[in-house]
Amino acid sequence: MEVTHEILVMLYQRVISLFQYYQVLGQTNSTFILLSSLIIGLLVCCFVKYLLNVIQVQRTTQNIHQQMLNSILLAPIQYFDINPSGRIINRFSNDLSLCDNSTNQVCLDILELIGNFFIALITLAVLQPYFIFMICFIIILNLYQYHFYNKIVSQLKENELIQRSPLFDFIKKTIGGSIQIRVYKQQDLFKKQFLDLSNKCNLNSLTYCYSIRSFCFNIDFIGFIASSVGLFIFLNLNSNDVAIFSQGLLLLITYNDGLSLGLKQLINFATQMSSYNRMFQIIDVESEAPQVKDIDSKLPNFPESGHIKFNNVCMRYRENSNFILKGLSFEVQSGEKIGCVGRTGAGKSSILQAIFRMCEIEDCEDSKIEIAGVNTKQLGLQKLRSSIGIIPQFPFLFTGSLRSNLDPFGQYDDQAIWEALEVTGLIEYARSFSKGLLTDICDVNSLFFLGQKQLICLARILLQKKKIIVLDEATANLDMKTDDFIQNTLKQQLKDCTLFTIAHRLNTIADYDKVMVIENGNAIEFDTPFNLMAQSLNSTTIDRKTQFSYLVFNTGESNSRVIFDIAKNKLINSNK
C-alpha cells in the first residue's frame, strides 16, 4: 500500500510538470480528469493504509497487554520480590503506551519519509545521470552519521526509560506513606529525593534531545550541500528543458526535508524495540504450577481431614540462595491446634509459603508435603489454596460490597452471612449501614478499624468452614481484648478444624495442643506447651531448659507465670 501511494505521488508530480505540453496539445480536460483520479487514488490509499494500520496496532497491543497481564497474574511470588512495583508499572504504562501510540506512526514515517527520499534520488538520477555521484556522497555520509548517532541516542533513550522505574516506585511508596510523612514532617526530605530522581530522569531526556538535534542538523547540512551541487548541475546542463529542469528543481528543494525525521524515527524504532523486549521479558516469565489438574476432579471433598505432614522439606526462595527450610519434618493430626514460634527469620512464615505452594519445595529425596494423605504437588494450585483458610497479619478489604468481601464467589445466602457477622460481633455495626450487606467498601473503608477488618477476615473463615486454618501472626497488631476474642471464637466455632498459628504473643498459644519451635529452618522442639516448660506434671514453675521456655521467660516474670498456668490447666483438662 505504501509503494502504491508513492507511485501515485510520482505520477501526480510528473503530470504537473508536463501540464504545459498538455495545454499545447489541447488535452486540458483529460489532464484534469487524470489529476482528479490520481488525487482520489491517493485518498483511498491513505484511508486504507491508516485503517489497516489502526486495526493491526489495536490487535497487537491488546494481545501483548493480555499476555503480560496473564503472565503477571500467574507469576511466582519470587518475581515480585526481585522486581519492584515501579518497574512493573513502567512496563504497563510507558512501554505499552509506546507500543499503543508511537510504534505504528514511527513505522509509517520510516516507510514514507525514507521511501520518498530514495524515490526522489532515483528520479533525480534518471533526470540527470551526473547527479549519481552526489547520490553516492549523500548515502555514504548519511549511513556514517546514522551508525555513529544510533549507538549514542539509543542508549540515552533506553537509559531514560529505565530511569523512570525508580521514579514510579518512589511515587507509589510516597503516596502509600503520605500520612506518615506528614506526621513526622518529612515533606522536605521526600521532596528532595523526588527532585533527585526526577533530575536523573530529565538529564537523560535532555541529553537525548540535544543528540537528536545535532543529528538532524548534520543530516540537513549534508542535504544542503548536495542540493547546491545538484542545482548547479541542472542549471548548466538542463536549463533548456523546462520540464526536466522544473521537476529536478522541485525534487532538489524537497527531497531532503523528511530524511532527518525519517532517520530519527528509525533510531526511535530501534529504541522502542527495547520496550518490546522488556514487555516480552514479562510475557516469558515462568509461571506457577498449573492452576487446575485432572486429579482435582477426583477429589471433590479434599481435604477429607486436617492432617498435615512435612517430610524432609527443603525450600529456598531463589536458585543459588541459601535454604530457608532445611529438611523440616513434623506431623499434625486432624483437629490439632498447633502454635509455631521462633525468632525473626527462623522460617516460620516460610512454612505457610510451602503449604500454599507460594514457593515450591526442592525435589530432595522423600521431600514432600501431604495434606489428608495427598501430596500437595499432585494438586492444582486453585484446588490446594481454596481448601485452606488463612487470616493474614494485615487484613485487606477488596473493592466491592461488604457481602462480596465475605462471600466473593456467592456460595452462601444472606442468613449465613449475618450469622457469621453475629459470631464475630459485627452484626450491629453492619446493620448500621443503610445498604447493609450491599454497602460499598470504598464508601466505608475508613470507618473500619484494623481490629474490625480482621474480624471481617474471621467472619469469612467462619463462613467457609475449612478443615485447615492458618494464622500468620494475625493478631500481632491488635489489642489483647480483640486478640482473645478471635482466639476464643476460633476455638469454639472451629473445634474440629486443624489450626496452625504463627504466634506473636505466646499467651495466645499457651492452651494449644502443641507448640513447634523453629530455628534455622528446622523444628528443634515440638511438644505440648507444658512439656516444653516443665519436667513433670508436679512442677509448679518453669523448670525445664528449652528454647520455648527461654522465649516464655523473656515475656516477663508475671506473664510467664500466666502462660505456665494456662498450659498446665490445658494438659490436666485434656487428660481427664
Image: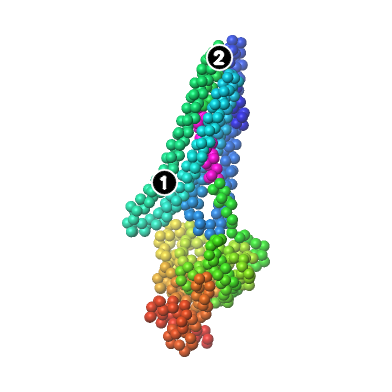
Query: In the rendered structure, which amino acid carries the disc numbered 1?
Result: Lys
Nearest to viewer (mark 2 / mark 1): 2
Marks 2 and 1, how far apart in space? 56 Å
User: Where 257 falls versus 495 (above or below)?
Assistant: above
Residue range highlighted in magenta: 257-276
Placement of the N terminus among the 4 image quadrants: top right
User: Where 85 falls versus 15 (above or below)?
Assistant: below
Q: Which residue is mark 1?
A: 200
**Is residue 44 visible to us here?**
no
Residue 151 in percent (x, y) is at 51, 40
Which residue is at a point 49% across and 24% down the rendered structure image? 225
Magenta-colored stretch includes residue 547: no
Q: Main secondary structure of the magenta part?
A: helix
Query: In the rendered structure, which amino acid carries the disc numbered 2?
Result: Leu
Q: Earlier in the sequence, mark 2 or mark 1?
A: 1
User: Where 282 falls versus 516 (above or below)?
Assistant: above
**Is residue 539 visible to us here?**
yes
Which residue is at a point 59% across and 65% down the rendered structure image? 362
Q: Which residue is mark 2?
A: 237
